[in-house]
Amino acid sequence: DITARSLGSRYLVEFSAGGENLAETWVETSQDQLDWTRTGRVLRKPPYSFTLQAAKLPPAASFVRGVARDICGNTGHSIPVPLPYAPR
């Protein structure tokens, strides 16, 4: 489950991650849902809540997803969701 809300010049992105032995989580952005760029900081424990400065996002970032990695290096990601009011 992932949500993205506009807070004026920032976005609030929150997601949940299931599984055991999660080591870290982060947010990625994309313009086309094919190439993804890690954006922001890494969190190591819930709640997985990220505030992203719109001015610091890659140009034309329109989609966001949450990513989690476990202690063995396995990664999983959420479904992509559009950033509210993002340029298309």
Image (cartoon, grey):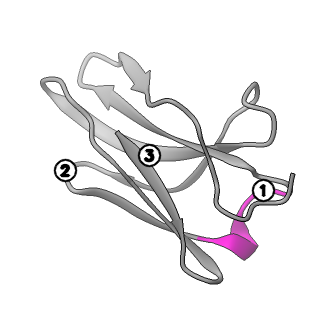
Instruction: Kindly identify which residue carries mark 3.
Output: 26
- Circle 2 Cα neighbour tier, 10 Å, few/some/many (<14 / 14–19 / ≥20): few
Q: Is 25 rendered above or below residue 52?
A: above
Q: Amino acid at mark 1?
A: Pro
Secondary element at tag 2: loop
Q: Earlier in the sequence, mark 2 or mark 3?
A: 3
Quadrant location of residue 75?
top left
Q: Amino acid at mark 3?
A: Trp
Magenta span includes 22: no
**x 14%, y 27%: residue:** 21
Counting from the top left corner in percent of width and height, residue 87 is at 84, 59
Secondary element at tag 3: strand
* Mark 2 vs mark 3, CA separation in Å: 11 Å
Q: Is 38 rendered above or below residue 74?
A: below
* Mark 1 vs mark 2, CA separation in Å: 26 Å
Counting from the top left corner in percent of width and height, residue 52 is at 56, 67
- Does residue 16 appear left or right of residue 19 in this picture? right
Magenta segment boundaries in residue numbering: 53-59
Instruction: Kindly identify which residue carries mark 2.
Output: 45
Instruction: Kindly identify which residue carries mark 1.
Output: 58
Secondary element at tag 1: loop
Mark number for residue 48? none
